[in-house]
Every structure is written in C-alpha cells, then in structure tokens.
Amino acid sequence: MCRKVVIRAVPFFISVLVAGVLLLTGACNGLGEGATHIYASQIEVEYPEGMTVDNGATIRFKLVNQSIYCIKIPVEDSFPVFVYLQDGSAVQVRNTRTYINPIFKLNVVTTLNSRKNIEVTPELPVGDEKFNQSLFKAYILIEGSDCGDPSVAVAKKIPFFIRYYTDY
C-alpha cells in the first residue's frame, strides 16, 4: 500500500521562507560586533612570594590580563582586605598599604603592560576576640571595567592567608 503525499506549494513555501528569514537574521546578529565581556578568570593571579603573609607584613600579587580588552581598576587609597572568621562571615580589616595612583590599568594580553604588581599589608587588630586563630583565609576584592566602556564591569577575589600570632 502506497500512499500519495501531497504537499501544498503555498504553505510549504511560506514555512520555508519563514524558517530561512529566522535563520538568516539570527546569523546576522552574530556577525556584527558583539557585546564586550570580561570574565574574572581572564585575570590571572601570580604569587611571587607565596600565598601566606604574616600579620602586618606585605604580600605581593601579580595580576596578568589574559583578555583582549584593556581593564582599568580604580583604587581609593588601598585595596580592601577581607578576612573569613570561624563562623564563615567575612570582615574587612585594615590595609596599611596605600596607593597614590588612583587607577591601575591592565592593557591587553599582547602588550608588556598586561601585568601589574600590587601589594597589600593586612593588619589584624591585636587582642580582638574575633581573631583567635593562628591562620586566616583572606582575600582582596578588585573591581574594574573595560577602559573604553565603563558599563562592562569585572570583579575578582584574590585569595591568600594571613598568619596571625595569638601570643602577642
């Protein structure tokens, strides 16, 4: 038993035309200049002297921009340092390292200026009941944007450890 399949020309032509238009307009949107995206993973962090610092000492980080976009990071006096407490909450502690230059600029990956060294000097208060461990997990938060488009933002937590001596 063979059945005849009858395809009506006009509805078939209209459905093919609509599918083709949808396909072409979707492809054209991808051909134009897309939106800029900078991801935190595109900023690599290197620890030249390790990830642990004594309380009151300076730790150095090297930021490496792996993106194809210039990133500027504004700094108001110093980078904020946050320390995780035993209950899991994070509190901001003093960073005695201050910067005169209000903006760090990480140029695109293909240039020499895609790397910047930053330093923080965390200072945990002596005798504070919250700080009763010998080692604290900490981080600094850097927030920046595309050099040409401030609406394109990026934020990255840079983890490290603070060795705190409890026998002061």
Image (tube, rainbow, N blue to C red):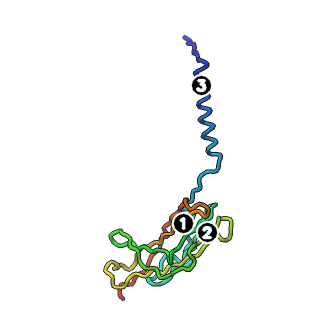
Tell me where residue 162 sits by quadrant.
Answer: bottom left
- Residue that appears at 51% across and 69% down: 142
Q: Residues within 10 Å of mark 1 (few under 14, many from 20)?
A: many
Q: Which mark is residue 144?
A: 1
Q: Residues within 10 Å of mark 2 (few under 14, many from 20)?
A: many
- Figure check: 113 above or below 151: below
Tell me the CA gap for discs 2 and 3. Answer: 52 Å
Q: Are marks 1 and 2 in contact (CB under 8 Å)?
A: yes
User: Residue lying farthest left?
Assistant: 129
Identify which residue, 137 or 124, lies in the foreground.
Answer: 124
Q: At numbered mark 2, what does the secondary structure look like: helix, strand or loop?
A: strand
Residue bearing the label numbered 3: 14
Lower sequence index among marks 3 and 1: 3
Tell me where residue 166 sits by quadrant.
Answer: bottom left
- Residue that appears at 56% across and 80% down: 100
Residue bearing the label numbered 2: 106
Expressed as whole percent of the image width and height from the top left, the position of residue 27 reads 63, 41
Q: Nearer the viewer, mark 1 or mark 2?
A: 1
- Residue that appears at 60% across and 20% down: 10
Lower sequence index among marks 1 and 2: 2
- Figure check: 148 above or below 94: above
Residue type marked 3:
Ile
